[in-house]
Image (spheres, rainbow, N blue to C red):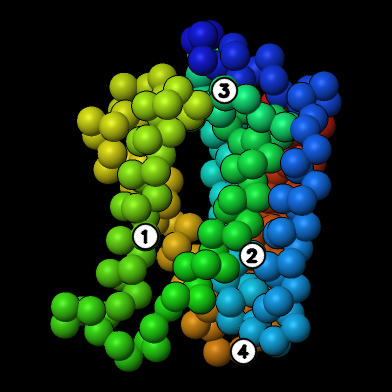
Amino acid sequence: MTDNARAALELLRDADQFKWYVIPLLLLVIYVYAVEVERRNWNVLFAGLALWGMDWFNEIWNALVFHVTERAPVWAASGPTAYQILIGLNIEICFMFAIMGIAAAKMLPPEETRIFGLPNRPVLIAANSAAAVGVEVLLNKAGVLTWDWSWWQPGFPFLIWIVGYVPFFTACFLVHDLPTVRAKALTVGAIFGVDAVALIGFGAAGWL
């Protein structure tokens, strides 16, 4: 087991790490979604939930990598936190991703708008993913988000980009553009349904 993985493991679901700032952060997340509900802005609401659900999926398989290899997850959140949910996911990261999809969806132009002559959705997926990878590199250099596998490093960020973020923004924008609220709700429900089954099943097995 790497030192970084061990440091994150020591924090895992330790209630003694609790900090009171979690409560206003939670209220901020609730407020962000409440605004979209108030405005009946279902495109943005479900887009935000889609991205959040995709992050949970990534965090689950990341924890499973650690369980299987017993060496390290693909990424570990080993810095100070108010609560460590999974080995690569703390409460601060969780709340961040809960809001990220809302922010990305609110900045979407109409589908017919082109950027540099190209359809805007693929361009924005690529650009948003690249920006997110840039933030991760800074967090890695700060030592609070650690990477212990040679193929997941700042020197080769393609996998971080294509696996870590492109699916997030793709799901976010696809759900945003679905034609009906029912289709949006079913898609988001499917994403969170898979997450819930995985959390319950693998969690009960002690793999997370």
Mark closer to the chain start, 3 or 1: 3
Whole-angstrom CA distance, mark 3 to mark 2, is 26 Å
Mark 3 or 4: in front is 3
User: What residue lies at 80% left-to-right and 47% top-to-bottom?
Assistant: 23
Would you name the residue on which mark 1 appears?
128
**Position of residue 101 in the picture relative to residue 196 (left or right):** left
Q: Tell me the mark number nearer the camera, choosing from 3 and 2.
A: 3
Disc 4 designates what residue?
180
Q: Relative to residue 113, is residue 122 depicted above or below?
A: above
The percent position of residue 64, horizontal first and vertical second, equals 59, 30
Q: Is residue 183 visible?
A: no
Horizontal side, residue 74 vs residue 117: left or right: right
C-alpha gap between disc 3 and disc 1: 25 Å
Q: Amino acid at mark 1?
A: Asn
Tell me if label 3 and label 1 are in contact, CB under 8 Å: no
How many labels, in total? 4
Q: Which residue is mark 2?
A: 49
| Residue type at numbered disc 2 | Leu
For disc 3, the marked residue is 78
Tell me the CA gap for discs 1 and 2.
17 Å
Q: Quadrant of residue 31?
A: bottom right
Q: Is residue 19 among the parts visible in the rendering?
A: yes
Q: Residue at x 51, y 9 (%)?
A: 3
Q: Nearer the viewer, residue 123 or 100?
A: 100
Q: Amino acid at mark 3?
A: Ser
